[in-house]
Image (tube, rainbow, N blue to C red):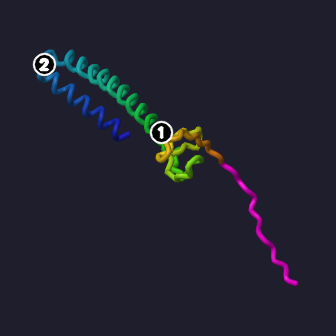
Amino acid sequence: MINILKSFIITILVSTIFAFIIEPFWKTFIITTLLQFIIFYFFNTLYQGYIVKKAMELNIQLENEKAKSTVTLPCPSCNYIQQVEMSFNKTTTYKCDKCNTEIKAEPNVKNYLTTNPIYVEK
C-alpha cells in the first residue's frame, strides 16, 4: 500500500512540475499524468514478459542440467574406460577415444531387493 501511495505521489509531483513549466496548467497536468500511466503500463508489460521469458529459460536449463550425469563406461570392443556424459531420460551415442568405435549407451535403472541376514543362535 505504501509503494502504491509513493508511486502516485511521484506521478502527481512530476505532472505538477511539467504543468508549471508548460502552460495551460490543467491541460498539461492531465496530459502528463495520462502519458505517465500509459508509458509505465507498457513498460511494465514488456518488462514482465521479459522476466517470465527469462524465468522459463532458466527453468528449462535447470531441468536439463538435473537430468545430466557423468558415468564411467568401458568400450565393448577394446575395454578402454572413459567418462561419458549421459542423460537419464534419453539414449546417448558416443565414440570411443581409443578405437573410435561408435557406442550407444542406454540409461538403465534397476532396483534390487536387499536381504538382511538373520543370525539364529544354536
Please state which amino acid type lies under the numbered disc 1. Asn
Note whether 10 is above or below 119 in the view shown. Answer: above
Main SS, magenta region, reads loop
Please state which amino acid type lies under the numbered disc 2. Ile
Instruction: Name the residue located 59 percent from the left edge and 43 percent from the top edge.
Output: 105
Left or right for 54, reference 39: right
State the residue in front, 39 or 78: 78
Rendered image quadrant of residue 7: top left
Of labels 2 and 1, earlier in sequence is: 2
**In what quadrant of the picture does the C terminus appear?**
bottom right
The boundaries of the magenta stretch are 109-122
Q: Nearer the viewer, mark 2 or mark 1?
A: 1
Spot occupied by residue 85 in the image (x, y as percentages of width and height): 50, 46
Spot occupied by residue 5 in the image (x, y as percentages of width and height): 32, 36
Instruction: Name the residue located 77 percent from the left edge and 65 percent from the top edge.
Output: 115
Question: What's the mark number on residue 22?
Answer: 2
Left or right for 77, reference 2: right
Residue projecting furthest to the left: 21
Q: Residue 38 magenta-drawn?
A: no
State the residue in front, 66 or 88: 88
Q: Which residue is mark 1?
A: 59
Label 1: element kind: helix
